């Protein structure tokens, strides 16, 4: 017992952990990953993790911790520009603007929804109404022009068959084909705005303003508990989505894809693909070992574990016979 405890405590611990880690890596490195990992067992582990872990008390505690950290902010405020490369932000915006054809196709599918059509009609009606109201306010300052503009507005409303109704109300009540037309017009505005070169420059200028401001906790902008409901709703959504059997099936497909892509690698080759050096992994294990082993030694748990493992061997009839001889 003393011999094994010495190997797992004090100055011997680092050498023991390094030796064991190297020995394990040497042993498994003679085999491909596909030979070391059972695909079905890995799928079961991944599926169980998706079903159970997100709804666990630990994750709920992590959500609470994230809420507090977000509210408190960094200990030392800093600007986003200090940690985020502007050139990468510019590239991301360029790539995002390049996706406008895909966005246009996605927005076009929204025309099939009557509710979306009604919402788009009301939105366009408010825009038109605000423009008319602004023009009317300006025209009222010019003698005679205000009445002329009001007459033109009423005439335009009469042309579309609703002379006694406000223009914004008429547009807001548009449905069916009119709603689909409103959605298409709104989509065209959105897409054309994104394609406009000034939009990209405006987004970059907005980033420059945001990035230059010191990053502080959201407690300065949100009242206590104001965002709690949103975080809880997001957590519930994640729990329900990940636990769905179809999500688990998708995760199983990811496992199959991972093994198909990397199953032919040895563990050391996979570490290299992940830019993790074998020596660094061993050094990390050596660094972590004291924090794990010292509490076990101080509490006596390590000695009990070792004794439980060694006692059956030394108490066996085969060893007793060997010692008797």
Image: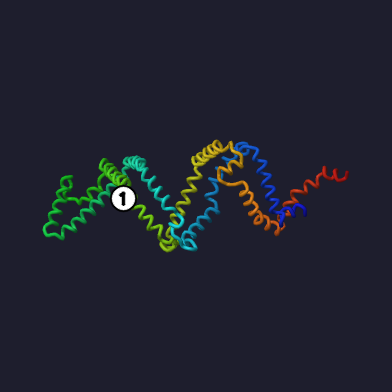
Residue 221 seen by the camera: yes
Q: Is residue 100 left or right of residue 166?
A: right
SS at mark 1 in the image: helix
Q: Quadrant of residue 6?
A: bottom right
Q: Residue at x 48, y 48 (%)?
A: 238
Q: Residue at x 64, y 40 (%)?
A: 29
Outermost residue on the right side: it is 325
* Count of numbered labels shown in the rendering: 1
Q: Quadrant of residue 268?
A: top right
Q: Quadrant of the C terminus?
A: top right
Residue 148 on image: x %, y % = 12, 54
Front residue (pair 272, 50): 272
Residue 251 on image: x %, y % = 52, 41
- In this figure, which colouring scheme has been used for the structure? rainbow
Front residue (pair 205, 130): 205
Residue for badge 1: 198
Q: Is residue 71 left or right of residue 275?
A: left
Residue 99 on image: x %, y % = 37, 43
Q: Is residue 315 left or right of residue 291?
A: right
- Graded by Cα atoms within 10 Å as few (under 14), some (14 to 19) or many (20 or more), the crowding at tag 1 reads few
Outermost residue on the left side: it is 144
Front residue (pair 94, 165): 94
* Figure check: 262 above or below 140: above
* Figure check: 11 above or below 25: below
Residue 118 seen by the camera: no
Outermost residue on the front side: it is 87
Q: Residue at x 47, y 59 (%)?
A: 70
Q: Quadrant of residue 38?
A: top right
Residue 189 on image: x %, y % = 29, 46
């Amino acid at each position: 017992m003393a011999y094994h405890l010495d190997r797992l405590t004090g100055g011997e611990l680092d050498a023991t952990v390094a030796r064991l880690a190297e020995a394990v890596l040497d042993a498994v490195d003679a085999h491909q990953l596909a030979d070391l990992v059972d695909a079905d067992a890995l799928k079961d582990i991944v599926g169980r993790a998706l079903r159970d872990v997100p709804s666990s008390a630990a994750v709920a505690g992590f959500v609470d911790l994230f809420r507090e950290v977000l509210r408190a902010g960094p200990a030392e405020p800093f600007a986003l520009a200090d940690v985020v490369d502007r050139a990468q932000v510019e590239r991301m915006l360029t790539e995002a603007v390049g996706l406008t054809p895909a966005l246009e196709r996605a927005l076009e599918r929204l025309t099939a929804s009557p509710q979306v059509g009604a919402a788009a009609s009301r939105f366009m009606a408010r825009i038109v109404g605000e423009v008319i109201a602004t023009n009317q306010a300006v025209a009222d300052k010019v003698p005679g022009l205000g009445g002329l503009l009001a007459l033109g507005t009423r005439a335009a409303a009469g042309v579309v068959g609703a002379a006694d109704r406000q223009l914004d109300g008429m547009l807001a009540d548009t449905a069916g084909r009119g709603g689909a037309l409103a959605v298409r017009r709104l989509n065209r505005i959105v897409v054309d705005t994104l394609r406009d070169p000034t939009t990209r420059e405006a987004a970059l200028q907005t980033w420059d303003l945001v990035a230059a401001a010191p990053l502080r906790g959201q407690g300065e902008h949100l009242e206590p508990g104001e965002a709690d409901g949103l975080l809880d709703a997001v957590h519930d959504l994640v729990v329900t989505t990940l636990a769905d059997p179809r999500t688990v099936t998708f995760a199983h497909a990811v496992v199959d894809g991972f093994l198909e892509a990397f199953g032919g690698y040895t563990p050391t080759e996979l570490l290299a693909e992940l830019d993790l050096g074998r020596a660094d992994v061993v050094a990390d294990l050596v660094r972590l070992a004291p924090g794990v082993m010292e509490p076990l030694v101080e509490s006596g748990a390590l000695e009990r574990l070792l004794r439980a493992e060694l006692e059956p061997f030394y108490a066996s009839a085969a060893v007793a016979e060997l010692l008797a001889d």
